Image (cartoon, rainbow, N blue to C red):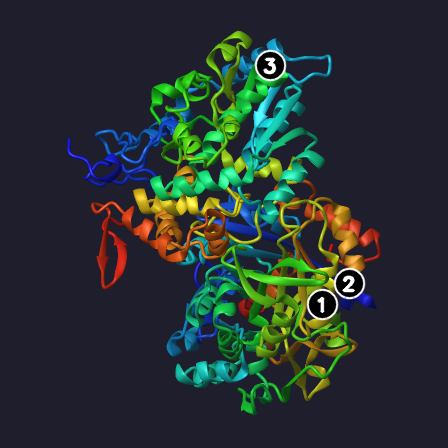
Amino acid sequence: METGMYGLPLDVKFCTRCVISNQRPRSTVEFKSTKDEKKETVAFGSDGVCDACRYAEWKKTKIDWKKRENELRALCDKHRRSDGSYDCIVPGSGGKDSGFTSHILKYTYGMNPLTVTWAPHLYTEVGWKNFQNWMHVGGLDNILFTPNGRVHRLLTKLAFQNLLHPFQPFIIGQKYVAPKTALHYKVPLIFYGENQAEYGNKIEENDKPTMDERFFAQDVTLDELKLGGVSAAELIKEKKIFPQDVSPYLPAPKDEIKKLGVEVHYLGYYLRWDPQENFYYCAEHTGFQANSERTEGTYSKYSSIDDKIDRFHFYTTLIKFGMGQASHDASQEVRNGKITREEAVALVRKYDQEFPKKYFKEFLEYVDIDEGTFWKLIDAGRPPHLWEKKNGEWILKYQLA
Amino acid sequence: MAQNKIVRVLSRLDIKGPHVVKTVHAEGLRVVGEPRVLAARYYEAWVDGIIYMDIVASLYEREFDFEQLKRVTEGLFIPLTVGGGMRSVSDIDRALRSGADKVAINTHAVYNPPLIEEAAKRFGSQCVVLSVEAKAVGEERWEAYTEGGREPSGKDVVEWVREATARGAGEILLTSIDRDGTKKGYDIDLIQAVRAASPVPVIAHGGAGTVEDIVDAVLATDAKAISASTLFHYDLASVGEVKRALAAAGVPVRL
Amino acid sequence: MTNGKPKIVVVDYGVGNLQNAVSAVALYANVSLTSDAEEIREADGVVLPGVGSYPSGMDGLTKRGLIAPILDVVRRGVPLLGICLGAQLLLEKSTEFGETEGLGIISGNVVRFPELSEDAKIPNIGWRPLGITEEGKDSVLLDGVPDETLMFFIHSYVLQPADKKAVLATSEHGGYTFASVVRKDAVFGTQFHPEKSGKLGLRIVENFVRIVSR
């Protein structure tokens, strides 16, 4: 089958239930990402319904949540420590999802979580406040890991230049900080919030409570490890980074993971996952505050609000796949029954293509790129089967209807 | 007799489609009930008025559902304030014809302040309510937000209230975004600041979690009208309990 | 009269808020909402509701050719109930937005509230007690409505009837007393909204229907 740029299907289709299109990639093993890789995209059924919606439907009707909760209790009973040491690791930013996960595990299920945070590139004011409240109001212990800023900025710059994916180094580091913390503290149980299938991965991957080990534990050489599309070995050779700078981006070693018996579980497997309800929960229990104004590129005030650079993650997904943050947020809310498809369409049309002006200058400074180069890279990253230029303006060929 | 100082206790229904929803910090769309059921419940409990707001009409850029309004308010013989996506004098007219006594405008008053004058001239100031969603932005300063509490308008709340009342708004529906849905009590400073600046009545809203919150706010600000959503929709207290507590505190209410 | 109930028309003259008036009357009588002169002339009773400015009220009546039929039914002694703006239009004139002539059925004028105290804002919005006068105590309209009953008001202008006897009840705002229920023969006016004042407001509507049925 012929594919377009990024290996995307040439024939653009929108899900008939939510508002994502078939251009949406599935999650990948990020550290393998290179410029020329072909993305695997979310699957659509012959009825035009995407896998994520299908899963949401299945979740609503086919799951015995009482049974699942009992499984959670059993899992917690197995791991719970009463000697004051930590018995589970909960990675996150202190936003609504990790806030919910950590707090409910501690205060309802009697666990003793250690939360661990891979620092955002640039904290927003509301993000920092929510992060602090997570501990001070929510009552959790936390380790904040801030990677070497100079290295992280360089990698982010490379990721933006080479992959048009500035968030890649963040995603890599964030994914591995929990398993490595687990090894360090000798705590084998890790809880994530949601399974990526919520966002369109294979349904088969959803039917188990645990994350596949290949996503967080690998033995990888410095040649194999690609950061911002460049191998770590090359970066070291060119003296862009020291060998020791690589360590935060390395996945956890397989043998150590096996030895400790580390397992990553999704709380969303055991408890019905509803991000909006997580917001209400956290507003009540962890001092979480929604942002005062809506986030640029979407209508929401509580989704991904802690990192100034986050807007550019979603802006690049808009450029590469035709979908920005509004598409992401709206699709999720359709699946969770908060809004109708019609309402989602109205929101996507209104906000999805909004340029994130507020932190643009800061972003350019952060990645050390001038505005001209920024636009050159952006425009070069627009798949021709998605974008066309009309009257000097770039417009999406396929608009949501 | 100080009967003139009767304090109105109102209930506010935030409407999205066929549901009543409840936000926190003007965010979230959690369904808490059916409009007709809740409105009737409060009417039977002698609530002094219902505020019916479509909180997504401006955000989704869609029409207010007047037919639903009529269905929900049929047979409720108490004052009704209606708002949400009111763009023009003809929208306001339609709302009044559909049972509203007063129409609240926010987003479109901010985008088009002459709308206030137009409406006041056509229907009388008493029909025009300025809805203000206020977010604290500093010491004793608040900014007005539009589009369901999502867009900062750049307008200082106190100044905006002065301007809007000069243009003919006959009442202010004042909501604290910071307290909305939090059950942490009303923003007393905000209410006092706006009451001082407004020549017209102010309805205080946002933050009630207990009966005491209402009594405290009324006693501290001397507000003549107070409204709650979370408190009533989540059944944390009844209209009757609130009124009895106010009466016990020496506040005249309609019992 | 049909099925034992009188036919009452609620006049639609283009100034909003009619639903409750219609629903309230419908509880006790056959009701129709109309701007048809003939229908008004043939009714057993007339309700003149209204919300808005005086000039737009008179304009609305004029445009629809309703002034003559209303004066006609009043002349014939058909009971009429004016509510809020509707009550104000019954008087001779108002000073809202310049001077406007009213229907002149009840002598007196409509004027704006004077400057009141800090606490008493204008419009007068809220529940105010009725101070029922001697005339009011005998009236059928206020039968079963205790003195000091709270009714819902929302207005910036007040009724000032020339004849004290025309006042069935007064109310107060900011220390200023004004007429809240007025009457001349079978024509009644309430400054407040009985259709918005809960159960006791409905009692007034019921009483009006009784008057129509006599």
Asked whether, in this view, residue B33 is left or right of residue C119, the answer is: left
Question: Compared to A264, does C125 lie above or below?
Answer: below
Q: What is the crowding at mark 2: few (fewer than 14 residues within 10 Å), some, or many (at least 20)?
A: some
Q: Is residue C162 visible?
A: yes
At x 56%, y 60%, the residue is B145
Q: What is the crowding at mark 1: few (fewer than 14 residues within 10 Å), some, or many (at least 20)?
A: many
Residue B195: which numbered mark, if any?
Answer: 1
Question: What amino acid type should be assigned to the residue bearing mark 3?
Answer: Cys
> Alpha carbon of mark 2 to alpha carbon of mark 3: how far?
52 Å
Q: How many marks?
A: 3
Q: Earlier in the sequence, mark 1 or mark 2?
A: 1
Q: Which residue is mark 2?
A: B222
Q: Secondary structure at mark 1?
A: helix
> At which x and y percent is residue B172?
62, 66
Q: Secondary structure at mark 2?
A: loop
> At which x and y percent is residue A138?
68, 33
Dots 1 and 3 on the same chain = no
The C terminus of chain B is located in which quarter?
Answer: bottom right
Q: Chain of mark 3?
A: A
Between A175 and C116, the one lying in front of the other is A175
